[in-house]
Amino acid sequence: MGRTDRKQKMLLLGSAVFFCVVVVATLIFKGSTGFQWIMSGLTVGSIYALIAMGFSVIYSSTHVINFAQGEFSMLGGMLMYTLSTRGGVPPLLGFLLAVLMVTALGAGLERATIHPLRDQSVITVIIVTIGISIFLRALAKWIWGTDPVKIASFSGDSPVRFLGAAVVPQSFWVFGFAILAVILVFLFFNRTLMGKGMRAAANNADAASLVGISTSTSSLVAWTIASGLGAAAGIVIAPISFASYSVGTMLGLKGFSSAILGGLGSAPGAVVGGLVLGVLETITAGVFPSGYKDAVAFLILILVLLVRPQGLLGKPEDVKV
Amino acid sequence: MDRKLEKGRSSGRGDYRTLLIVAAFIFLVPAWSRMIPGEVLHMDIVNVMVFAGIYACVVIGLNLLVGYGGQISLGHAAFFGIGAYTTAILCTRFAWFPTWLGALSGVLLAGLIGWLVGVPVLRLKGNYLAMATLGLGEIAFILFTQLKGLTGGTIGIPQGLNVSVSEIPPLSVFGFKFDSDIKFFFLAWAIVMLLMLLNINIIRSRVGRGLRALHSSEIAADAMGVNTSRYKTQVFVLSAMFAALGGALFAHFQRYINPESFVFSVSILFITMVVVGGMGNLWGGIVGVIVLTFLPSVIQAMPQWIPGIPASLTNFSNYSLVLYGLLLIVFMMFMPQGIAAGLSRASAFTGRRAKRLRDRIQARKYEGH
Amino acid sequence: MEINKSTTKVLVLATCLMVAVSLSAIGCGQQKVDTSKEVFKIGAVLSLSGPAAPLGQPEQRALMLLQDNLNSGAGVNGHKVEFIFEDDESQPEKAKAAITRLINQEKVAAVIGSSTTGATLAMAPVAQSSKVALVCCAAGTKITQPVVSYVFRTPPTDSMAITKVLDYLKGTLKVKKIAILHDSNAFGTGGADELSQKAPGSGIEVVSRESYGSTDTDMTAQLTKIKGTPAQAIVVWGTNPGPASIAKNMQQLGITIPFIGSHGIANKKFIELAGPAANGVVFPAGKLLIPSSITEGSDWRKAVDEFAKEYKAKYNMETDTFAAHGYDAGLLITTAMKTAGNDRVKLRDQIEQTEGVVGIDGVFTYSPTNHDGLKTSDLIMIEINNGAWAEIKSS
């Protein structure tokens, strides 16, 4: 056991060193342009990280991949548009209302569709989340139509310049929000009784019930947190990515990839995965013919998984005998 | 999951009999569907069935991989696409190239790529395997789009409408051309039935036993001397070849392909068909394919069947996907083991009831004596 | 005498006939659909869902408006007109299945669609072999070049837009080196290919060609690459929201060379999304975007104004170019039906003889060698100034 542990640590270290070499090489060979790529990559990456965290929260308490996670962010953005941009509700109140509405929806969906399937296999539940995502996307198209909409940036559009790179202020909001979210999620799962119980519930229902957490409560709380987090993320990123009925698909795909890259079920892993993926994407778009940028990003992702089959910060999946 | 698998494993002779019944039912579709005028149904049943047959090739293989092998793939649209592009490229570049050989080349190439990719990737488990296969699917899609010289890029094959240049020819075997919906219907479903036959034999063979051991517990199987990674690779390659066969049929039926038919959502559709039909259930694949291929057509046609639905609801086709998503959720909630399992349980239930009734009648008779 | 009598008879008869004819003409003038007459069915396969839904939805809305307008009047010569809609979900196989069903089951006289080039290319062979006219709303050059007998189109082609852009680059901006940044989807790639091919003919060199994914939100990497080249202008070929992100990214990076867009951003949405970054952006578009660019009092101008008014009244939405493509496709077929009825082959022949039919996109004229209907001169270059469109008068 000890040896595999050490091997794993070496591989992690290796991945980290490789990533740093890529970043440093970019900076050396491309100078301020390279720095611009990294800053842009971090912005895109923190968007991915925010979505990835929602995947992580539900996974770590129920072992389900929620394919509707991107749709919560889509709904957050669209509701914010309706409430504040069109409806004239003050932005902060609009933000809270939109998050509250999506949270209620997330909790309701869990009770209506996920809870009745608590004894079924994980893949069944995953297909249900695919159904939920199709349903929510179609509903949004019905309500808001197909055109993308714009939500004003929180603090203006004039770019901040430093070290030759230009960054829009909203990037700092996204970045800050990602850090805040990861701290809160990490504290919840590691410092509160409920959070610890929820993690236990995912692995051993009986043990968890001893501390008073049933798998049923655990699943409800996880969905509530994930939908709220997703909605808030959707609102914070909307000024950069625009909001439309169809953004959920892309966000879900990239969020899932980040969560896997970082290691499923680990909140810090989600952030690391998101940031690494974002930076890799922009650097490959800069270095390779840009048509191939997603292919290169996915190739690297697969290679990382082959080297570290449980993602960067993940623990090896429990093997059941 | 395992519980259901035990049930799904049915005895050999029964499977062959069911196959005959299913085949008879399906091959009679054109006969009875012709009796209903098209204006009533608002769909072309034979045409939809051709697509169902094409997708069934993919889904039967995927069901072997997912339901029996316990391995997931979110990238099977890639193999579907490899089958389609290989035969399309060969048959349009070289006019003399026999179409059946084109299809065969596609199947073999997909098998080769499946093996090259499967050996390293199948070391991953669960969601990480899902991610890796998803990534492979995306890479394949990007290659279909970017390798313009080979695949025709986003425009696809053929590159335009000048018919004489390079249309994908219809599939022909020994000079017999499958160039109409009805001919293709029989071809596609005959192939599906052959694949099912193959499927039944595989499940009953040593490989099948190995796969089942793999599914219920990989560690135990390993300990008992089952070469797990070999079985995993074999079933992955097989499912890739089934998918490519479906793709080749698709290309020769459509006679025009572009990357849009091989996107991520198609991979998701395949896996959804497996689960909705019944994972690890022999008939799950076919049932899932038929239900999910017909569902959109049924939903679109429904307003015409039911009078009095307001026009605002049917316009702009907004309601159809809302309903599709809802139905998907409902199916899984009421038949979490898949529709095929639900059906067999229902038939077993009625079968038991019938038996009880027979027994009672029999008992009465004796009482009468 | 005999002769005289018969002459009188003939005269009386003729008068009666003339009265009858004029009466029936007045009857027509009352504008009523005759329910005893056969309904004229026209199929419409559009991308109502999937990535191309923003194209298909306005096209369907416009066709429903046309259907209402026709049927509240005399229909086509008293025949009620019915458009039968099918959704191709932006996928070629669904489009092909849909047109097959419309032709075989619904027995439509002609088909409109689809919204995208790929779906249209999948449908066209079916239309051709079944001898049913197909009028598409897609702009891909390959659909009508070379001409196939049963396939027509209403929107200006990508190559007209590209010619317009190259003329502007050469004539007005007088640049020699450009960069292309395009969406990696069919629209963007097709446009970029054609642009790279035609640029040398205008004495313009393409010094950089980059692409982005339709759902990407940040194109700074591609833009910094372009910044390092001697490009004097960037041509962006894509549809919303990509080009809006590019305009914002250019402002962020301080790239000031001209941004020339495609007809894919010929809508108010682009201005809304890009905000102040939209100012100075130039793109080619149909004249209907700026009605004042159409001669005052002309039939075309009246049609455009009327259409905008009715569309607004029915849907409470602004019209866009896609709505115009859909409307014109329906108009083209129903106009031809007035002479040809609903016989499929006669209808096709009649569409090919269309001359001077006033639509929304322009005035349509077809011939056996030209199935495009519009001309490059039906397009104008538009510049965005302070969030509003202004026509650039060619120098």
Image (tube, helix red, strand yellow):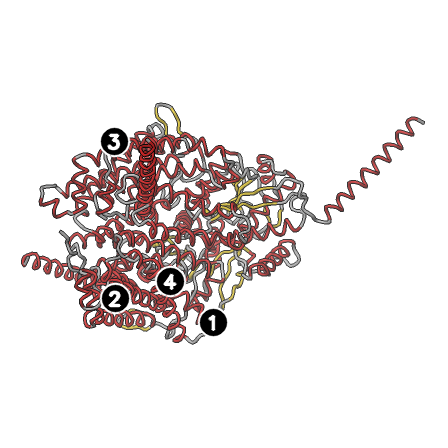
Residue A74 disc label: 4
Whether residues under marks 4 and 3 lie with C-beta atoms below 8 angstroms apart, the answer is no
Proximity of marks 1 and 2: CB atoms separated by less than 8 Å: no
Q: Within 10 Å of the Cα at label 3, are there few (<14), some (14-19), or many (20+) other Cα atoms?
A: few
Q: Which amino acid does label 4 sit on?
A: Met
- Above or below: residue A27 compared with residue C49: below
Amino acid tagged 3: Arg
Upstream in sequence: badge 2 or badge 4: 2
Q: Are marks 4 and 1 in contact (CB under 8 Å)?
A: no
> Are there few (<14), some (14-19), or many (20+) residues within 10 Å of tag 2?
many
Residue A33 in sight here: no
| Tags 2 and 4 on a common chain | yes
Q: Is residue B284 visible?
A: yes
Chain for disc number 4: A
Name the secondary structure under disc 2: helix
Helix, strand or loop at mark 1 = loop
Judged from this view, the residue extending furthest toward the top is B174
Same chain, marks 4 and 3? no
Residue positioned 20% across, 35% down in the render: B204
Chain letter of disc 1 in the image: A
Mark 4 or mark 1: which comes first in sequence? 4
Image quadrant where residue A33 sits:
bottom left
Residue under label 2, please give it: A35
Looking at the rendered structure, the kind of residue marked 1 is Gly
Left or right side of A143 for B5: left
Label 3: element kind: helix
Q: Position of residue B281 (x, y in %)?
A: 27, 41
The nearer-to-camera label among 1 and 3 is 3
The answer to which quarter of the image holds residue A311 is bottom left
Q: Residue B13 carries which label?
A: 3
**How far, Cα to Cα, is label 4 from label 3?**
52 Å
Discs 1 and 3 share one subunit: no
